Image (cartoon, rainbow, N blue to C red):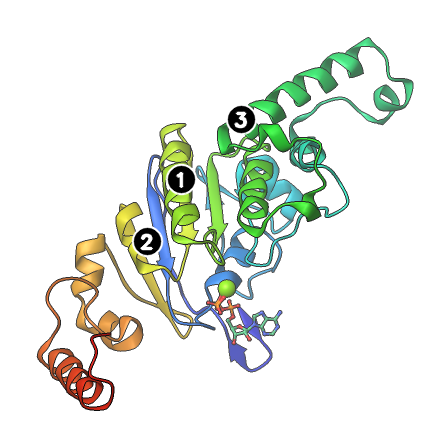
Amino acid sequence: MRFGGLTAVRSVDFTVNSGEIVGLIGPNGAGKTTFFNCLTGLYIPTEGTVSYKGTVLPPKPHLVTQAGIARTFQNIRLFANMTVLENVLVGRHTRTKEGLWSALLRGPGFKKAEKASEDRAMELLEFIGLAHKRDHLARNLPYGEQRKLEIARALASEPGLLLLDEPTAGMNPQETRTTEELVFAIRDMGIAVLVIEHDMRFIFNLCDRVAVLVQGEKLVEGTSEVVQADERVVAAYLGEPFEGAPGEAEAAEVAAAESTTSNTKGEAQ
Ligand SMILES: Nc1ncnc2c1ncn2[C@@H]1O[C@H](COP(=O)(O)OP(=O)(O)OP(=O)(O)O)[C@@H](O)[C@H]1O
Ligand SMILES: [Mg+2]
């Protein structure tokens, strides 16, 4: 994907298999969101194709949704002045067959379809834990719940693949943990998940595989263990070993900081 002189995503070859949770990580500006935008038809890639279940997808968002790929956005995009339930119902429109005339006439077919849609939307709200807030306006929800509502709306299109762009951004540790459980539960429903996150603990706990984008290129792809141990990833992104004992340099830094602290304040930090 090129924007004028800037190549935001370059030759990224990437597959998500059914039943998998796959992570996409990389520094700010690496091209992660741009990659999602290419997958979902929001951007038309300068070169390359996106296939879903063996069929090349046209770069049109509604056709991509219809084919079975749903997403959430890094910057939450809810209908702020609609209720929680209405937001989920909007997500269902690609899956309802009733046409314009049927809706205008509000005949028995329409009413039945409307009821079925509402039942399904309520099921999804139960699933994400927001059923009790069905009639609240989306804008009045706390931030973490807005992120969850976005997930429910994406699920309402009955996807086979769900793309999550920083689902835990701005969440507290408790909310992050429940989101982790939620993603596992979504996978267990038979939906493959591709997730972008900067929270490495979240990513490495959750994902079967992780791909690392740096400056638009895929640097490494592998299991959490492989990616965490890869020196190029540590250098380009993680900056320090993620798990295990601190390295020598870090231990020296800690020791230096401790001695400074005890000299100036005489108390432990
Ligand atoms: N519509 C656009 N027009 C021009 N440049 C763009 C456009 N969208 C993205 N870019 C550029 O592409 C690069 C990749 O941006 P992108 O938002 O994909 O990064 P990211 O990996 O999602 O970063 P972050 O972790 O901060 O969300 C950046 O240099 C960005 O400025
Ligand atoms: Mg992004």
Mark 3 neighbour class, 10 Å CA radius: few under 14, some 14 to 19, many 20 or more: some
Structural crowding at the residue carrying mark 1, measured as other residues with C-alpha within 10 Å and reported as few (<14), some (14–19) or many (≥20): many
**Left/right of residue 7 with respect to residue 234 in the rendered view:** right
Residue 183 numbered mark, or none: 1
Q: Marks 1 and 3, Cα distance to the nearest angstrom?
A: 15 Å
Per the image, the residue denoted by label 3 is: 126
The answer to which image quadrant residue 198 occupies is bottom left
The amino acid on which the numbered mark 1 sits, given as a three-letter code, is: Val
Along the viewing direction, whichever of 38 and 198 lies nearer the viewer: 198
Near-viewer residue (135 or 21): 135
Judging depth in this view, the residue of 250 and 113 nearest the camera is 250
- Dot 3 or dot 2: first in sequence order is 3
- Label 3 amino acid? Glu
Disc 2 crowd rating (10 Å Cα; few below 14, some 14-19, many 20+) is many
Q: In which quarter of the view is residue 218 placed?
A: bottom left
The spot of residue 225 in percent (x, y) is 17, 55
Residues at marks 3 and 2, CA–CA distance in whole angstroms: 25 Å
Q: Nearer the viewer, residue 146 or 72?
A: 146
Distance in Å between CA atoms under marks 1 and 2: 11 Å
Location of the C terminus by quadrant is bottom left
Q: Residue at x 36, y 59 (%)?
A: 199
Return the residue found at the far front.
266
Residue 203: give its label: 2
